[in-house]
Each structure stands twice: as structure tokens, then as C-alpha cells.
Image (cartoon, helix red, strand yellow):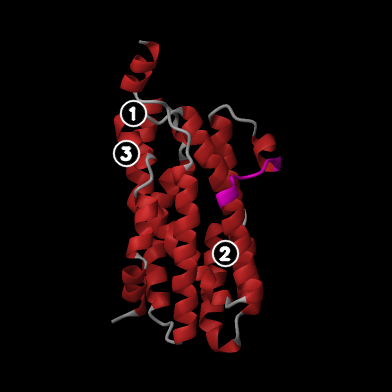
């Protein structure tokens, strides 16, 4: 069995923590407010701004036997650099103060995820960073475009407020095929373990963030409270 398939199978249960977030039920029901959306984008900004630095740090610490991975990281960085600014553009289009968000702090789950990834690179096996790639790109493919369309429709947002979700849903299709091919070249058991372990942790922490998205109360709950 290919390592990519092993990675998918070994993290299937962990992935449910992401896909089971209440927001993914709330969005089709119209229970996802502008505040919900801007909160999510704010968290996205605070982890996406670390994507290129994390990949740079990973590439610097990879051993020579993984030179083909370092080459792949160069391509990833060229593709990913500056995407955090797209998110600030979306937030500004929603009426948010981009500089206040830039200077602000993320949710604890995102702080922990980013800190763990730097620690994995510096004190563990740097190849583990690709566990994060598994989580974020896989989630984008499955959820970004269809959920983004619903959010835009329900909230009446312009296209310029949706660039992050729309671009990543389509863009990550190609990225994920590239990722699949790269993972199938990872043959060392310790490297494979590091990627699987990191993916599990990122599914937990990224899922915790998604579970924390503030959602409006259900209509019937509001009616009950008034009564």
C-alpha cells in the first residue's frame, strides 16, 4: 500500500474531528453569521502567515537524503507566499480593521498548532510538517469551495470577501495531487510516523478551532428564550 493511502487510513478517525465541527452543519442551515465568518478568517490569517516560514525552517533542517523534499518545498513556498495578505483583503471587504487583526492574537488552538509545528521542526523530525499539509489542503478540497458558496449566498458578500476560500478550494486540488506523489516517495518508517503523528495533532487542534467558531443561536432556541 502506498504511504499516501496509509496516511489517509491512519488519520481517518482524527479527520472526523474536523468534519464534525458544528459550523459545517450550521452553514447550509443559514446559521453562520458575518461574525462567524470573520472569526474563522482571523484564525486562518494567524496560521497561514506561518506557512512559508514553517516551510523555510523545515527545508533548512532536512537531511541530504530528503533533498527531493527540499526541492518540493521550494515549489510550495512559491505557491503559498503572501496568501495571508489575501485573507486580510477578505476581512477588509467584510468591514474589519486589517491592521488590528494583523496585530491581534489567535485562538489558543491556533497558537498551540503553530507552536507545535515549530517545535516539531526544531526538536523532532522536520518532515512531520507534511502532516499539517495533509490536514489543511485536504480540508480545503473537501470543504472550502462548497461551503464558501453557501456562505457568500447566505451573507450576501462580494467576491472580494471570498478570495481565500474560493482560491484554496480550486488551487488545492492540484496541490493535493502533488502532495500525494511526494508522500508516496517517503519510505523511511520514522519519517512516515512523524507525518502521521503530526497530522493527528493538527486534526485535533485545527478541529478545535473549527469547533470554536461562534454561531448564532437556533431560531427555535431564541423563540424559547423570549417565551
N-term-proximal mark, 1 vs 2: 1
Task: Estimate the x, y position of residue 74 in percent, counting from the top left.
Answer: 57, 70
Q: What is the span of residues highlighted in magenta in the rendered image? A: 103-109
Q: Which mark is residue 30?
A: 1
Q: Decide: is 81 above or below 195.
A: above
Look at the image and say whether residue 106 sits in the magenta stretch. yes
Residue picked out by circle 3? 25
- The numbered dot on residue 58 is none
Q: Residues within 10 Å of mark 1 (few under 14, many from 20)?
A: some
Q: Where does label 2 land, which residue?
A: 77
Q: Which quadrant is home to the N terminus?
A: bottom left
Quick one: label 3, few (<14), some, or many (20+) residues within 10 Å? few
Q: Is residue 20 left or right of residue 93?
A: left
- Whichever of callouts 3 and 2 sits on the residue coming sooner in the sequence is 3
Residue at (35% x, 37% y) in the render = 149
Residue 186 lies, in percent from the top left, at: 43, 82
Q: Residues within 10 Å of mark 2 (few under 14, many from 20)?
A: some
Amino acid at each position: 500500500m502506498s504511504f499516501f493511502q496509509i496516511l489517509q487510513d491512519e488519520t481517518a478517525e482524527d479527520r472526523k474531528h474536523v468534519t464534525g465541527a458544528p459550523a459545517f452543519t450550521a452553514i447550509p442551515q443559514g446559521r453562520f453569521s458575518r461574525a462567524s465568518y470573520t472569526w474563522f478568517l482571523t484564525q486562518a490569517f494567524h496560521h497561514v502567515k506561518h506557512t512559508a516560514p514553517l516551510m523555510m525552517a523545515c527545508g533548512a533542517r532536512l537531511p541530504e537524503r530528503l533533498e527531493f523534499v527540499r526541492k518540493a518545498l521550494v515549489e510550495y513556498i512559491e505557491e503559498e507566499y503572501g496568501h495571508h495578505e489575501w485573507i486580510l483583503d477578505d476581512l477588509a471587504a467584510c468591514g474589519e480593521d486589517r491592521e488590528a487583526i494583523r496585530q491581534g492574537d489567535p485562538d489558543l488552538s491556533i497558537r498551540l498548532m503553530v507552536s507545535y509545528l515549530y517545535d516539531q521542526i526544531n526538536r523532532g523530525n522536520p518532515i512531520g510538517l507534511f502532516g499539517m499539509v495533509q490536514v489543511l489542503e485536504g480540508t480545503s478540497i473537501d470543504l472550502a469551495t462548497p461551503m464558501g458558496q453557501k456562505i457568500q449566498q447566505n451573507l450576501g458578500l462580494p467576491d472580494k470577501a471570498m478570495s481565500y476560500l474560493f482560491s484554496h478550494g480550486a488551487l488545492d486540488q492540484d496541490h493535493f495531487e502533488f502532495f500525494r506523489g511526494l508522500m508516496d516517495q517517503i519510505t523511511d518508517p520514522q519519517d512516515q510516523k512523524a507525518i502521521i503523528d503530526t497530522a493527528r495533532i493538527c486534526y485535533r487542534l485545527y478541529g478545535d478551532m473549527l469547533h470554536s467558531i461562534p454561531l448564532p443561536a437556533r431560531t427555535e432556541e431564541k423563540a424559547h428564550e423570549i417565551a
